[in-house]
Image: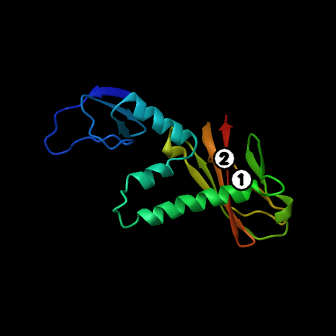
Amino acid sequence: MITAQPDQKQTSTQIHCFHCVEPCKETTIHLEEKAFCCEGCKLLYEILNENNLCNYYDVTQSSGNSPDYYAKELVFQDQIEKEQRSRALTEDVSFMMGSEQLDIQFPREMKSTKISGNVQLFCPVDAKKDISFAIEADSNGKQIIPLNQVKAGRYKLQISWKANGLEYYKENVIVRN
């Protein structure tokens, strides 16, 4: 829920914008339990969030003087490489959303290969709906996920897996009715 309200004068705690980290002055806009100083910062957050680029905040909100800045940058680069590796496969990961289950088919080139990792259903508007499943693909590279625990909503399907010593990542949007 988005609300805009004048900031209350606080003597001990200043509210800072989640995006630009500047103090929120006259008005604070709230979205997903985050505070923004203006519509522009909120919009930039929504764009980054919609495109699964919120790792940006992990890097930028810890300054270059932070001892873990370089490590966080490497994690972000690692994510990019996993996505590139996934796109370089001869066949894409496919999925079929049914009323009671989600079928995920890993590429044929991974058939009879041990595949490990997890499948995350990330709900951008309600973190309480987020749910994760371990990958337990059969020998044909098929994973079946029962949807009885998944509530209705729009989700980012995030598949992070390892096969033949390499890590991969694929993301798509699904809707559970």
In the image, residue 89 lies at what x, y percent?
79, 58
In this view of the protein, can residue 112 be seen by the observer?
A: yes
Residue 144 x %, y % = 75, 54
The quadrant of the rendering that contains the N terminus is top left
Q: Which residue is most to the bottom?
A: 165
**Residue 145 - label:** 1
Viewer-proximal residue among 80 and 131: 80
- Rendering quarter of residue 137: bottom right
The circle drawn on residue 169 is none
Q: Please, what is the three-letter code of the amino acid marked with disc 2?
A: Asn
Q: Quadrant of the C terminus?
A: top right
- Using a 10 Å C-alpha cutoff, classify the residue at mark 2 as few (fewer than 14 neighbours), some (14 to 19) or many (20 or more): few
User: In the displayed structure, does residue 138 sit left or right of residue 3?
Assistant: right
| Secondary structure at numbered mark 2 | loop
Q: Residue at x 16, y 38 (%)?
A: 10
**Mark 2, residue position:** 148
Residue 161 point in image, percent of width and height? 68, 62
Q: Is residue 55 left or right of residue 133?
A: left
- 1 or 2: mark nearer the eye: 1
Please provide percent x and percent y for residue 147. Answer: 68, 47
